Image: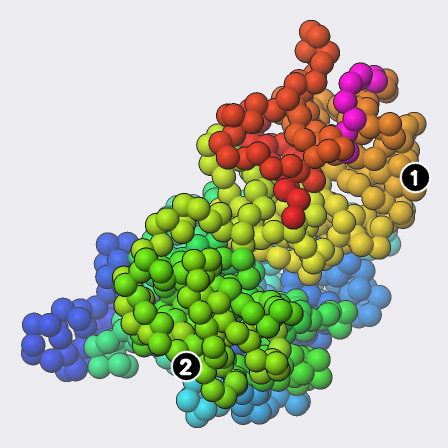
Amino acid sequence: MFESRTMRHAKMKLSFLSFLLICCTTITISATAEQASEPFVGTVESLERYECPEWFGDAKFGIWSCWNAYTVPGVGDWYARLMYIEGSSHYKYHVANYGHPSEFGYKDIIPLWKGEKFNPEEQIELFKKAGAKYFVAMANHHDNFDLWDSKHQKWNSVNYGPKIDIIGAWRKATLRSGLRFGLTSHLERTWSWFQTNKGADKNGPYAGIPYDGNDPKYQDLYLKPDLNGDDNAAHPVNAPVEWREHWLERCQDVIQQHDPDMFYVDGGVPFYGDDEGRTGLEMIAYLYNNSLRTNEGKNEAVMCIKNWAAKKGRWGYYWPGIATLDVERGRLEKINPDPWQTDTSIGDWTWNRNTTYRSAREIIHELVDIVSKNGNLLLNVSPRDDGSLDADAVQLLEDIGDWMAVNSESIYESRYWKIWGIDDFRIVQKEGALYVTTFDWPTSRSLTVPFLALHDSPAKIAKVELLGHNGALRFENQEKGLVIRLPECKPCDHAWVFKISGERFDEMDLTEFNKTHVNKADKTKIWFQVSKKQTVKPGNKAVSFGKDDALWGINAEGFIFTKMGDSIEISKQRGIDIGAGLDGTVAAVGIDGLVYSLSHDGWQRVEGITGATRIDVDKKGKIWVLHREGKIAYYDGSWHTITGTGKDIGCGPDGLIAIVAGNGRIHTYAEGVWTKHQGGKFARIDVSPKTGHMVMVDVSGKVFVNRIGNADGTWKDLPIRKWQRIQEQATDVSCGQVNDDEIIGWINPE
């Protein structure tokens, strides 16, 4: 399936010698130039010389196209994996529409992908009008199929499917338009991710019949079986040497052929296990050296990697300083001095026949927030299987473009300021001016910017303008802040940008402001760990801690989000309550009262129950709900009802369940027996799955804590004095899953 190691090493040696020869003929004799164009090697120490190219910090906004054969079925980008998992929704869809995967597999989906309406010039022009300064194409996904004239994989878009060099076509159109060109590769997971094609049904008429991935004739696509049975959806546990070398060759091939200004892998630096990231580091060095070669000794290439070290390295390694940080479907909570990027999508990662798209307003707010923290937004817009964009996607891009046509001055080439914002304000600086964006247009025709109170500052304001409005605006510097008089008509929709010209803004001292103003954009305290607070946006409706104390919640718009470390990822699923278990199970009550569970297949309905209102997940992954007038049910493969009713429910250790009864008292259920506890009148409850601690919110919003088995049986006030500054009331509460219950989180009311 792969070339011999001898041939590979000979080619690599020849390629390296050729590169050194080219470098020797292009590097100037000056000492400075020699140092600047010194080739990188695949070590952390060498790659720490990386500096993010200035073009990336100027660009701020890029558009990405995730397009592949998976758009033929049009139900999700993990189709090639999930169609081989018996019982998954993708498997069911495949059997119903194409046949059983033992007879009609992914290899048979690929020829159905024609791309007959693919027009890269037309789409790039649309992306440019939407405001993008760089375009990124997906070079391959986890399905082992390359979208260029690959030298190392015959399963590519020139030989199969559309039968064109898709990456070459994208690159030509992109460079012609004056945009920067980037590539993403998702191949690092493929070895284990695609092993599901080696299985067979366990039940039904096809039980025991091997899927077509077992056919030796198609191992170039489907790969060899992993000797240890690794079918992990993340990076392989310990990918074989031949796969690691093959992965490197394919990355080097697409970099050499198409010379990207940006490159991205789907996670951290590959590979986990014996490799310890060495192959991934070698690839990054190749990218930078290729850019040195094609840009007269200057590295113009941006490498993006994700810091998913919290996930125990199974998604790749992360070393600060060797590349640019990428945050998937999330954003940082504060300014990062080095440029970084959020990659997200208008909807699903691929065109989906059942998808709905986000609003232009939401995406614009996200862009402005990210830019205020020194980041870029990379927005995926996926074509249909025929290569065209659907009408809703086109309209969304046009709406974003309308806003950018008025306000892009505040985006491109801007830089972060002393703070990123407060409340509904975001701020950047550019060429001596401040650009303040507000997400809320006041009805009073007067806007107060609190962090620009200049009465004791050397800074001076000369003029205030509203982008899109002709003429300067009246303003007054008051003790409470800069007060701006607004015009009668708004110049645009979604967000409004004020250009504030003056002098000595860099000398402003915001120390006292930061002491006296809790950033209300972060005012909703979500968790507390020992003496550490972490926050998310205000208005959240529900909160739950899951495996490894990942935070799950429902935001003000009803969307489910998860928070791990410094970033927040927001899904498309809407809900009214959420529960997360110690085993990694996450379940939610949708706005329709149905129950949904999260898997690699996305959010899937748990059939058999309606009218749900509250939910939690126990230690072993069993889903518990309140439904239809507070009735209690649990799911362990099928639904079961137990006696009793309640207003909220929490799952503890060893089968312990606690509810808030209709009268506000706490009832606990263990080993088939209910126990009623005296005292208190509560609205919300959660139970630590580790220790059995119960944390409650009473009807007035006060937080209480109790340990099962207290001798006096009384409820005890949470000792607020130990929690430093957290004195607000709460609307929902959750216990942490680890650290002996050191983490208790709650949502403050607005």
Q: What residue type is labelled 1?
A: Glu
Do residues under tags 1 and 2 come within 8 Å of each other at their CB atoms?
Answer: no
The disc at residue 629 is 1
Residue 661's spot in the image, x, y percent? 85, 28
Decide if residue 675 is on the left or right side of residue 246: right
For the magenta stretch, what is the residue range? 675-683
User: Who is closer to the viewer here, 345 or 91?
Assistant: 345
Q: Is residue 627 visible?
A: yes
Decide if residue 727 is on the left or right side of residue 259: right
406 magenta-colored: no
> Is label 2 in a helix, a strand or a loop?
strand
Residue 200's spot in the image, x, y percent? 73, 53
Q: Is residue 332 visible?
A: no
681 magenta-colored: yes
User: Crowding near pointer 1: few (<14 within 10 Å), some, many (20+)?
Assistant: few
Pointer 2 residue: 180
Image: 359 above or below 613: below
Decide if residue 682 is on the left or right side of residue 36: right
Image: 101 above or below 525: below
User: Crowding near pointer 2: few (<14 within 10 Å), some, many (20+)?
Assistant: many
Residue at point 18%, 72% (across, down): 37
Residue at point 65%, 48% (across, down): 750
First of labels 1, 2 by sequence position: 2
> Is label 1 in a helix, a strand or a loop?
loop
Image: 28 above or below 713: below
User: Who is closer to the viewer here, 185 or 164?
Assistant: 185
Residue at point 57%, 23% (across, down): 719
User: Who is closer to the viewer here, 65 or 677?
Assistant: 677
Q: What residue type is labelled 2?
A: Arg
**Which quarter of the figure has residue 580?**
top right
Residue 343's spot in the image, x, y percent? 52, 65
